[in-house]
Image: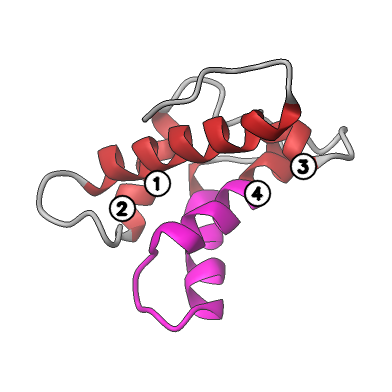
Amino acid sequence: KLILPNPDRNYDELYLYSQAETIFEVLAGQKNYDFITSNQFQRLAKFENMTNSHISKAHYDIIYKNVVRRSENTQMDLNCFFEALEDIAQRLYSNRRDVYENLS
């Protein structure tokens, strides 16, 4: 169930989580919703406004490898995906302090 943006900030986190989970499923494709490969993750760079002078497609591969290395898996699961999104947000919006603000 999708929770629409609401003035109450408590709902924003649920909306953000739902949207990120949907993106993860799109990247994973039909066969496997549990994990995504580096190539699937790099497809994020093709989305509008997902690259700039601080982050390029090559950075996505580095982010993928760093996040997966810290996990117990050999591929990226949904929890790792959220960690990676935080890293991407920090790089895309390096002039802002609040990472959550960058993601929303």
Tag 2–tag 1 contact (CB < 8 Å):
yes
Considering depth in this image, is 43 or 4 the residue closer to the camera? Answer: 4
Mark pair 1, 3: CA separation = 21 Å
First in sequence: mark 4 vs mark 3 = 4
Considering depth in this image, is 34 or 52 the residue closer to the camera? Answer: 34
Mark 3 lies on residue = 99
Look at discs 4 and 1 and give the one toward the viewer.
4
First in sequence: mark 1 vs mark 3 = 1
Classify the position of the C terminus by image quarter. Answer: top right
First in sequence: mark 4 vs mark 1 = 1
Residue 9 vertical position relative to residue 70 in the rendered view, above or below? above
Q: Which amino acid type corresponds to the residue marked 4 in the rendered image?
A: Glu
Mark 4 lies on residue = 86
Q: Which amino acid type corresponds to the residue marked 2 in the rendered image?
A: Asn
Q: Residues within 10 Å of mark 3 (few under 14, many from 20)?
A: some
Q: Which amino acid type corresponds to the residue marked 3 in the rendered image?
A: Val
For label 3, the SS is helix
Mark pair 2, 3: CA separation = 25 Å
Q: Which residue of the protein is positioned furthest toward the bottom in this rendering?
A: 72
Mark 2 lies on residue = 39
- Tell me which segment is drawn in magenta: 59-87
Mark 1 lies on residue = 42
Tag 4–tag 3 contact (CB < 8 Å):
yes
The picture places residue 89, in percent across and down from the top left corner, at 67, 40
Instruction: Name the main secondary structure of what is drawn in magenta.
Output: helix
